[in-house]
Amino acid sequence: MSDNGIYISRQSEDELYAELQMRTIQEIQGLSGDVWTDFNPHDPGVTIADVANYALTELSYKLSFKLEDYFSDTNGKYSIQKYGLFPDNEVYPTSPVTTDDYRKLILAHFPAVENVGIETDCEHGIYHVRLRLSPFFKGTDITKRVRCFFHKHRNLCENIGEVSIVEPQNLLFSADIELETDVDAIDVLVQVFHTAMSYIAGAVKIEAKPQDDFAVLSPDEWYDGTVEDVRVSIPTQKKTETELYHILMDIKGVKNFKTCYFYEDTPDGICEYRRKNDFKGIYKLEIPNDLSLIKVRVGNETVAIDFNRFKEKLRAFYFTKSTSRMRFYLQEHKTKDGSWENYPTESLREATYRDVYEHYPLENDLPRCYKTSEKDFTKNMTNEEKEDVKNFGSYLALFDKVIERGLGELDSVKTLLSLREDGVNTKMKLRYLDFLDNLYGVDSEQKWQYEFGSYGEMETEMIRRRMKFLQALPILTRDRFKAMDIMDERSVKNVAVIKQYVSLLLGFRNNEQVSVGNVLPSHNLIIMGESSKGKHFRDKLNSMLIDEKMLDEESVMPIIPNKAPSTEKEKQLRYKYIRKNLPIFNTNFISGGLFRNGINLNNYKIVELEREYLLVFRNEEDGEWMNLGRSEDKEKLNGWANTLCRYLQELNNLCEAMYVIEKNLFIPSEPFTVTIVFTGWTARTHSPQFRNKCLQLVRSLLPAHLKMEAYWLGAQQMQYFEECYHLWRDGLDGSNTSEVQKGYQSYMMKILTTDFTVGGNIEEDTDKNKGDT
């Protein structure tokens, strides 16, 4: 009998809808009691419930897709880095720590290197590299390229010493091989030669990421090392002829070896007494010029081998045995230092874009006889009937609003979880950032810094700073101990990673191409010294000090915060206006008390006089009040105070930076000491408590074996230091003579360790106390 019946079968209802409808009917029955007992679909209440349940079923359907679908753009792509969920190849790898780590890095990135040995000078933190080159690669600049590559990946206070090429002793291979039938003799012989070559060279194995995506190893096992998308294995070997013989016997197609010998290649030819049974020295298997020492048999018949074809296949097999080596070989000539780098900027994943954020109003699914708004009024309707229509429409609109709000929240998930957009729900955004902190074991907030003021940082600006830190998290955590690349030019990114970490976390300037010591001079300002020796000079400049008797409670008014300028142009116009109108800018000198305490609006007051008002400032460091200006318009003074406060907040923030100097680069006797140089004249960095917290943070990020020295410099001292540091830093690549470099090194340390006085009585705020940890 045919399965195609003559009747139309009723389709089964959606399980969720059926469940909702059943519960709705049960609820109506319980509420109505004996008043209403007809529960047929034609009843208005049942019809409304039916439409509402369909809407809820549709909502459930819209919420049932895969999570990545809601992150997808209209092109069906989404980036997981955008949401702080970094791919495994960015999270799991680590920076090199051991000699084997450096070996694997070099082996993975330089196809010309067949094996590498690294000797360490533990007393000075120096690595000596011995390269063993492949017979299929030729080049004269490999040592230079390896040296540059090492500096790109080295850790703090590590350096590279001698990079040399090892010339192994040649070995000749002599064998009488019996093969299985139905095999290609050349292919089997190529595998035998390649296996022997690899074993004698160290049997380094380089694997590309498998197509089946971690079928054998889990992601954390695959990426357990320093290389991202390949796996480098350096096995332990006995390095004996016996071990190699058993490996050769496992090659498919090899039936037996009648003879299998390895000889040293000597001018006298092959001598029986020069046969090698172990390969613990530095040897390599020589690629022969002919196959006179090799006899290949199938059964009792000798097989003729085309030598040229054999040699061509051996070369091809060498490259294709590992797809990663071949790819690196092709990439090698495209990069500056001959190595292959892979720092993915974006990992786009496949997804399905779902346009599910629109809601179809319930009233549109009801029959026309269901009146829901004023457009459904008729001429003969009473006022009471009209009110019923409005109330019914409002009830349906409330239901619609609940669903629309839910879909709106779903639509905002991309913005809420994005690390590149602020989002509209600040509270939820902060909770998500806290979640990422806990997920990766970091603290992007560092609440202690708010105790010292945050230069007017709004909550949205704090969120942006935290998001920027979390965006860079894979590099900041993986390469936390990484040093600057002294062989590359000075740039925004070429700094020690610990500097990037602290700068992103605390809002310091990270760009070493910009001198923070020149921030105030670029605004035609010079900060006055803070010691008692400079007090007399400051008092002369602060001739606008006012009498404390003028500050009675009845005449003093607080400053009312006003709205910040909305555009950069408006902000600069306001800054220009106060620079022109406030008498404190008549000279280029500004007191440290005003510069630092001026970031707090509570330190400004308006004093009412008989005919005008004064804008006064409390200099807490000198314990005196300063008159900043006067006007008949107190609103103008209020605006001046707000603008000056924002201006000083911005200047303080622009002046903050830190430098990381490895002492071993110019004082070999101190190989494991890191000198940290901080700005010392801003509101935060002038505070002893902030300095202590900051040093604790840096110490927690440094490797445990490194000693730390800290210096907090005054503004003009920082100018001299930065000028010398930049010249010294630019010469680390060898462009300067050793004498010139020594001069910069000597002068730089003199700046850091010597009391610094400039210009008569204008004394710099220098802190020569080192924070030794």
Image (cartoon, helix red, strand yellow):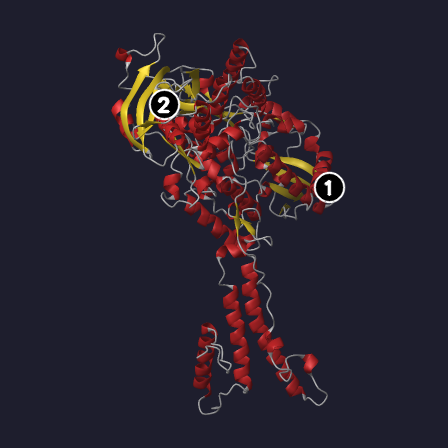
Residue linked to disc 1? 631
Quarter of the N terminus within the rendering: bottom left
| Residue 705 visible in the displayed image | no
Residue highlighted by disc 2: 201
* 698 w.r.t. 664: above or below: below
Position of 552 with respect to 2 (left or right) is right
- The quadrant in which the C terminus is found is top left
Quadrant for residue 299, please give it.
top left
Q: Secondary structure at mark 1?
A: strand
Quadrant assignment, res 239: top left
State how far apart marks 1 and 2 are (Cα).
Answer: 86 Å
* One can see residue 305 in this view: yes
Q: Position of residue 119 (x, y in %)?
A: 36, 19
Residue at position x 70%, y 47% in the image:
635
- Compared with 415, 676 (above or below) is above
> Which kind of residue does numbered mark 1 sit on?
Ser
Answer yes or no: do the residues labelled 1 and 2 have beta carbons within 8 Å? Answer: no
Give how far across and how far down residue 128 sits, in percent.
40, 18
